[in-house]
Amino acid sequence: MKYATRPGNMAMNHQSSDARLREALEGSGQRFTEQRAAVYHYLVGTNVHPTADEVLFGVRAELPSISLATVYKSLETLVGCGLAVKLTYADASARYDGRTDPHHHARCLACGSVTDLPGEIPEQEFEALRREAGSFTVVGYRLELSGYCSRCASAGAGTSLPV
Ligand code: ZN
Ligand code: MN
């Protein structure tokens, strides 16, 4: 997984995010298009880690004729340019994250929601893991807590076997 630092991404307006998008796309030999821009705006403006279907639903407010295939290709282009992170799961559709700075997630086993967690693994812990990995070249790591979101927990999820 590739991470780039992006200070203050939540406060970014369309103009500065467009400049950043254009630079990153063109740096990777890709064109700036209004579809890619709309997908990017949607992604950096939400913290729900949407699936491609959810991005389609959100972006249609801005571009009513955009197709799922275009949304999907735009998302993959953004991931390829380091502007988004793809979160894949064996049992569910991929989710996309417009936050590319290192952070951790909590995933609900009942509804599939993914939320950002505050806090970081201390650098020395990561270094210890890296040493344990021996000859394996470590470039990053992914930490995800699994369990039940407050809504699912109060509806009874997690009190018996996972649903
Ligand atoms: Zn849930
Ligand atoms: Mn995230």
Image (spheres, helix red, strand yellow):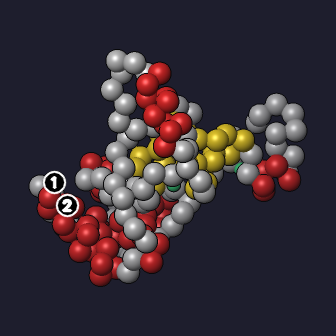
Near mark 1 (Cα within 10 A), the count class, few <14, some 14-19 or many ≥20, is few
Mark 2 touches mark 1? (CB < 8 Å): yes
Residue in the foreground of this view, choosing between 36 and 102: 102
Ligand 2 under 8 Å from disc 2 Cβ: no
User: In this rendering, is residue 23 above or below 30?
Assistant: below
**Going 34% across and 18% down the picture, which residue do you hit?**
135
Q: Tell me the SS state at disc 2.
A: helix
Quadrant of the snapshot with the C terminus: top right
Q: Is residue 138 visible?
A: yes
The residue beneath circle 1 is 28
| Whole-percent x, y for residue 7 in the image | 40, 68
The residue beneath circle 2 is 25
| Whole-percent x, y for residue 44 in the image | 43, 67
Residue in the foreground of this view, choosing between 108 and 39: 108
| Whole-percent x, y for residue 111 in the image | 68, 48
Would you identify the image quadrant in which residue 110 lies?
A: top right
Q: Is residue 104 left or right of residue 3?
A: right
The residues bearing labels 2 and 1 have C-alpha atoms spaced at a distance of 5 Å
Res. 8 mark? none
Furthest toward the top, the residue is 135
What type is the residue that disc 2 sits on?
A: Leu
What type is the residue that disc 1 sits on?
A: Ser
Q: Is residue 53 visible?
A: no
Near mark 2 (Cα within 10 A), the count class, few <14, some 14-19 or many ≥20, is many
| Whole-percent x, y for residue 43 in the image | 43, 64
Q: Is residue 67 left or right of residue 32?
A: right
Furthest toward the front, the residue is 124
